[in-house]
Amino acid sequence: MKSIVNISRILVGGLFIFSGLIKLNDPLGMSYKLEEYFSPEVLNLPVFEPYALMIAILVVVLEVVLGVFLLIGYKPKFTIWSLLALIVFFTFLTFYAWYFDKVKDCGCFGDFLKMTPFQSFMKDVVLLVFILILFFGMKYVNPIFGKLPTTVLALLGFIGSLWFGYHVIMHLPTWDFRGYAIGKNIAEGMSIPDDAPKPVIEYSWKFNENGEEKIYKTMGDYPTVEGDFVSVETKEIEKGYEPPIYDFSIENEEDKTAYFLSRENVIMIVSYNLNKIEADGAKKLSAFVKSATKNGYEVIGLTASGSDAKQRINEAYELELEWYLCDEKALKTVVRSNPGILEVDKGTVMQKVHWYDLEDFELPVVEKAIEEKSSLDNVAIFIDGKLSTKEEFKGLSEDQIENLYIYKDKEPVEEYNRENNTSYYNIIKVELKKDSIISNN
């Protein structure tokens, strides 16, 4: 019995520490998952939603600390009773998610390892068995060190867990397992290979035959039956390939996702909800946007908020920023900060920071992006106030240009077209450095 208890002690302690650290690395992600559980569609406990982050931190810190306590043998009775209560709580959540098909991913191992609700439930059942072994063999769980070293190690485990949780909330997760991590390409993360497994869907067709409703199940084919069609329901029997990124987009009146993911030196300022943006972070954005634009970067905002919130934030914090629409859940996944800032170069994430670390964002001067040749065919180009040709514009080198302005606002372009009876869709104004010579080559 003693050997079985010791094996259970190592397995349970190690797994609780590992699982807890994975979630403690991303407490905001854990809080989003708890909000999903508390939502009316799942447990219908919306009263707890405002406290999701606090609950998430307490739960994951407790998970790590109890794992440490168990391995070193600190207060065995308290530790094992607490482990039993925690695993019963986890088992209930995973059973509920699986049986009622309410939550697709329990979040047991954060973004490190995705598990289906059934897999999570079975994992918790196995853990429950091991913890029950510890419960009935509690007399064999003793401290492995003396009283003072054990107490010191327990205290260090508790303090270390709290510090790590605070650190990642004030910065970003130490380990980023999501599809938007630095070095990953967003466009590639959205793509589906040609040979990727397709989902297997079962169709339940309901027909009325002579006043009696009958159901015919197929794998997609319309059944050949005599009777009047009533309805059809589908059920996913087997999941197909799901790309790491599936809900990311950049939209205004049109879908600009492919456009921006093909551009170089794009800086994205992300705020999943502008009404919840942290004021201290928003205050830093104005100077940052101006500096980034001056150094040649294309700066855009991404949010799920409406036009009123966009206008209010731009006016309140003196932002010259065009906000594009993106799904809120996707933006929460992009960066665990509101606001968060990242640099994307042809779809690849080059830099990503929490607003608290905005001073660490590197902004070396880059060559200003110039539109493709075809896009200049209907653009009014002014060089030092003189209407010029696209050949003259293309003949300029970076060293000759003092300032370059691209008018994205439609109003001045439409006004120029009315006054000059033209049909330009954009205006580019170039200010040359002194003694610069225009070349047509």
Image: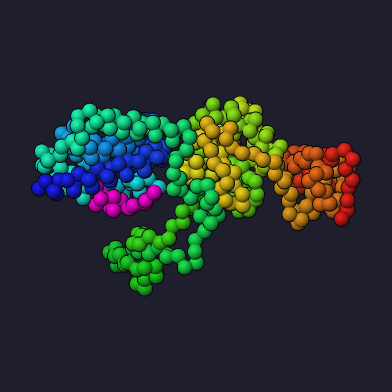
Q: Which residues are magenta?
A: 112-124
Q: Residue at x 34, y 29 (%)?
A: 159
Q: Residue at x 81, y 42 (%)?
A: 401
- Residue 138 inside the magenta-drawn segment: no
Q: Position of residue 38 (x, y in %)?
A: 34, 37
Q: Residue at x 65, y 30 (%)?
A: 287
Q: Position of residue 93 (x, y in %)?
A: 27, 43
Q: Quadrant of the C terminus?
A: bottom right
Foreground: 395 or 320?
A: 395
Residue 8 seen in render: yes
Q: Main secondary structure of the magenta part?
A: helix
Q: Residue at x 65, y 28 (%)?
A: 318
Seen as rendered, the residue at the extreme bottom is: 224
Depicted 227 relative to depicted 23: above or below: below
Foreground: 109 or 94?
A: 109
Foreground: 415 or 135?
A: 135
Foreground: 361 or 327?
A: 361
